Image (spheres, rainbow, N blue to C red):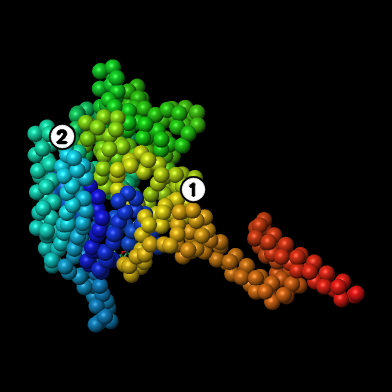
Amino acid sequence: MKINHLDLSNYKGFKDTSIDFDDGFNLIVGENGSGKTSLLDALAVAAGSFLLGVKGYDSRHIREEDVRIEFSKQSENPVPLPQYPVSVAAKGLIFDDVALHGKWELEWKREICGKGGKTTSKDARALKELVEKMVHKVQADQRVNLPLIAYYGAGRLWIPTKEMQATENIPSELNNSVRLDAYTFCIDPRIKLSEIFNWLANEKYIALEQGHENATFKAAKDAMRRCVDNCNYLDYSVKDKNLVVEYCGKGRLPFRLLSDGQRSMLAVVADIAIKAAVLNPHYGDAVLRETSGIVLLDEIDLHLHPKWQRQVVSNLISIFPKIQFFASTHSPQVIGETPAGQIIVLRQDGSWFKPDASLGLNSNEVLRDIMGANYVSRVFAEKLAELDTLLANAEFEVARNVLNVLRNEFPNVPEFDRVDAYMDRMDAIADEDDSGNCF
Ligand SMILES: Nc1ncnc2c1ncn2[C@@H]1O[C@H](COP(=O)(O)OP(=O)(O)OP(=O)(O)O)[C@@H](O)[C@H]1O
Ligand SMILES: [Mg+2]
């Protein structure tokens, strides 16, 4: 499944916005409040419409809080004016395995027409019927490649500590998932750690019983290993009743004791890998390479060191090459690793643009050209501008005095060496001129 185009009307902060998307990776950028999470929520409504055709699994409706609010200017106290109709319309590819299903491109729309109204699904009927047909095929044990759908919000790993300990330990019941179970809560932006540990424990017991690991279990563990820097070991331990990981030779630690960045990355990769394994077990060891679908990932750089921010996009693409990703970020490193054609920069008014360049820009250039931010401290930038004006006006003596004050205020800043070198050069030129005048 892929979403190539989205039209939003009165959805959260978007009055009337249309966006085209890349087939592979989409990076959503913009200031706080520009609508990155809102766009991911809208994509969740669009992608979640797939579940209209899978009975027993919830799709994502348009909610009351999604209705765009304007404020009346008629009275002194602003009165909220909810704007209708609210709609999320999408165009995309539902099943992309032409050999198995033919090529299925569809348009569908979800809408709330007025206050108290329910999200309509009449304009998603073709999608619903197509998915129902596929579900019948799954139930009749015919070969169907099911698309993965997953949403990871900025609070994806927030779980009360008590629940965390309870979910981390050995699951009370081990059961084999049916393929469609990968759609349970898939549009919920929180990760269900208990489902991850359940699946890993289940697979471990199967491996012990049958004397070898399932190919999908191996593939999932391999993907998880690749997303922890310097990982020496990763497995589900029956003895510890836990996922254990060793990195940098520090000994085998349970998942709970890993760092926020490691847990966040591991949980996302594990969840995607497990969903793929449950949906399409027939792919065997190629399950992560072959499963297509949609992953929504808010704040992809969450908790990651800049070194990992530089790798996270290429890691995800190489592990899950057929997934269409929609990720948001505030990281210049992530932006500097992504081609301009895959970046959507949101403005506060709901409009958007693609930058002229991004991949290969250094982080300062990304901050200045794409994110509209200072790449040095604002105060420092102002002082440096003052200094540059003095130099431009050849007021070198004053400039030297200012520079001495600034060196105390901003110690060890290499930028001042440039200013010093410039003034030395100007002094040398002046000396040459003076000596020239003598002759
Ligand atoms: N129902 C609504 N009606 C009008 N505007 C809304 C509505 N819901 C949200 N907004 C606007 O959208 C903004 C929030 O957007 P969103 O959370 O998507 O921003 P963001 O880009 O993800 O920001 P951050 O970087 O802080 O996470 C709010 O500041 C508000 O202005
Ligand atoms: Mg946000």
Task: Identify which amino acid the numbered label 1 is placed on.
Answer: Pro
| Residue at 39% from the left image edge and 29% from the top image edge | 234
| Residue at 21% from the left image edge and 53% from the top image edge | 92
The mark that comes first in sequence, 2 or 1, is 2
- Residue hosting label 2: 143
Report if the CB atoms under discs 2 and 1 are less than 8 Å apart. no
Residue 425: x, y in percent?
A: 75, 65
- Callout 1 secondary element: helix
Q: Does the residue tagged 1 have its C-beta within 8 Å of any atom of ligand 1? A: no
Seen from the viewer's position, the closer of residues 142 and 135 is 142
> Could you tell me if residue 249 is visible in this image?
yes
Determine whether 320 is above or below 388 in the image.
Answer: above
Seen from the viewer's position, the closer of residues 136 and 233 is 136
C-alpha separation, residue under disc 2 versus residue under disc 1: 42 Å
Is 439 on the left or on the right of 40, as rendered?
right
Residue 249: x, y in percent?
A: 50, 28
| Residue at 56% from the left image edge and 61% from the top image edge | 376
Residue 282: x, y in percent?
A: 21, 31
Is 135 on the left or on the right of 273, as rendered?
left
Is 47 on the left or on the right of 23, as rendered?
left
Is 378 on the left or on the right of 146, as rendered?
right
- Residue hosting label 1: 306
| Quadrant of the drawing holding the C terminus | bottom right
